[in-house]
Image (tube, helix red, strand yellow):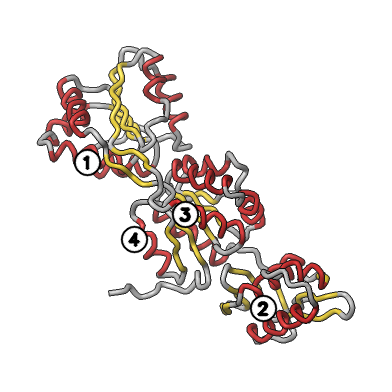
Amino acid sequence: MTAPPLSMALEGCRIVLTADRRTAEITAAFERHGAVVLRAPSLTIVPHADDEALIARTRELIDNPPDVVVATTGIGFRAWIEAADEAGLAGDLDRVLARARIVARGAKARGAVQQAGLPVAWVPESETAAELGERLVGEGVAGCRVAVQHHGSGADGLDELFAAHGASVVSLTMYRWGPPADPEAVRASTLAAGAGSVDAVVFTSAPGAYEWVTAARECGALEGIRRRAASGQLLLAAVGPATAAPLGDHALSVFIAERGRLGSLIRGVVAQLGAGRPRIATSAGELSLRSTGVVIGGRYTPLSPTGLAVLRVLFEARGAVVSRRALLDALPAHTVNDHALEMAIARLREALGLPRLVRTVVKRGYRLDLEEDA
């Protein structure tokens, strides 16, 4: 049974979801606010290829307990506990972990540790492996036995860092990142983001963000994405600072969830798309654009790609006159005759039901009718 809508705050919005897990949950949350969700997982999660090695290292920790345990991801820590349980080691591992000092890289890892009934000594404010490693090395790890549960890429540098400072390190990886199941869907999502066909792209892991940006760069969409994100017309949303880092490395404007949790991320995206979009005050009410239409005075109106392309240019001009040539250049088909533009303007006015919103400036072009004009 389909859950009733919570609101229509995201009506007309299209959101790209790059995650490989909990997609049904995230999709349902956005759909209940009226959005259309496009799934384009930029990576897949591959279970650990050698469970025997994982169990052997778990037995090793039970026989020779660690002083410090580092949890880097929630899904990885939970997978470790589940694997130990299946091997009949859950009780022994729980007793060992209860005596160790546990530090978590971020909020999701902390939540998984606490869900297992264990205390967390510290979480770095930046939620990065770099800050976590710097803190532990600063406190001193020489002579300590340190167990490190790794994220999917298994390449955060913590093992080498602790070993270089005299620690005995036990490395545990519960899953790894694999290539996307549908690379074409990932590529198409980057092109859509750069062209204005989506309103938001949501990221839940740093490796996933890195691969999506790489795909965008390879297909030539990165500059369009950067420009739209900077103008506020495209929302790039990350669950935490670590996830946002690959986007920031490419000078992309990123919204970061306050609490580093999916619930906070979803609420933030709803708020940003629903009320945080660029808008202008017109004679018909506040106007903001969405990837499939326009919201004027709180009412959403779907538009054709041609009508939306014309309105986007007029919106960016903020009431200034836009020449006929500039509007012709914006038409999707790049038609180069005045009749095509006049038909596009007429159909746009008809779709909006506001014939005076798009004003003709004789011998110069067109502009939006702003509130100050009224």
As helix, strand or loop, the secondary structure at mark 1 comes to: loop
- Dot 1 or dot 3: first in sequence order is 1
Residue 321 visible in the shown view: no
Identify the residue under disc 1: 117
Q: Amino acid at mark 1?
A: Gly
Distance Cα–Cα, label 1 vs label 3: 42 Å
Q: Are marks 1 and 4 in contact (CB under 8 Å)?
A: no
Picture coordinates of residue 137, whole percent (x, y): 42, 20
Q: Earlier in the sequence, mark 4 or mark 3?
A: 4
Which of pointers 3 and 2 lies earlier in the amino acid sequence?
3
Separation of residues labelled 4 and 3 (CA atoms) = 21 Å
Q: Is residue 26 left or right of residue 130?
A: left
- 39 over 337 or under it: above or below: above
Left or right of residue 217: residue 134 = left
Q: Nearer the viewer, mark 4 or mark 3?
A: 3
Residue that numbered label 2 is attached to? 285
For the residues labelled 4 and 3, say whether their Cβ atoms are less than 8 Å apart: no
**Mark 1 or mark 3: which is in front?**
3
User: Does the CB distance between marks 3 and 2 fall below 8 Å?
Assistant: no
| Secondary structure found at label 4 | helix
The structure residue drawn at horizontal position 43% and vertical position 34%, both measured from the top left corner, is 124
The residue shown at (32%, 34%) is: 71
Indicate the amino acid at tag 4. Ala
The picture places residue 2, in percent across and down from the top left corner, at 31, 74
Q: Kindly report the distance in space between the C-alpha atoms of the residues bearing marks 1 and 4.
A: 27 Å
SS state under label 2: strand
Amino acid beneath label 3: Glu
Query: Of callouts 2 and 4, which one flags the residue occurring earlier in the amino acid sequence?
Result: 4
CA distance for labels 3 and 2:
40 Å
Q: Nearer the viewer, residue 88 or 220?
A: 220
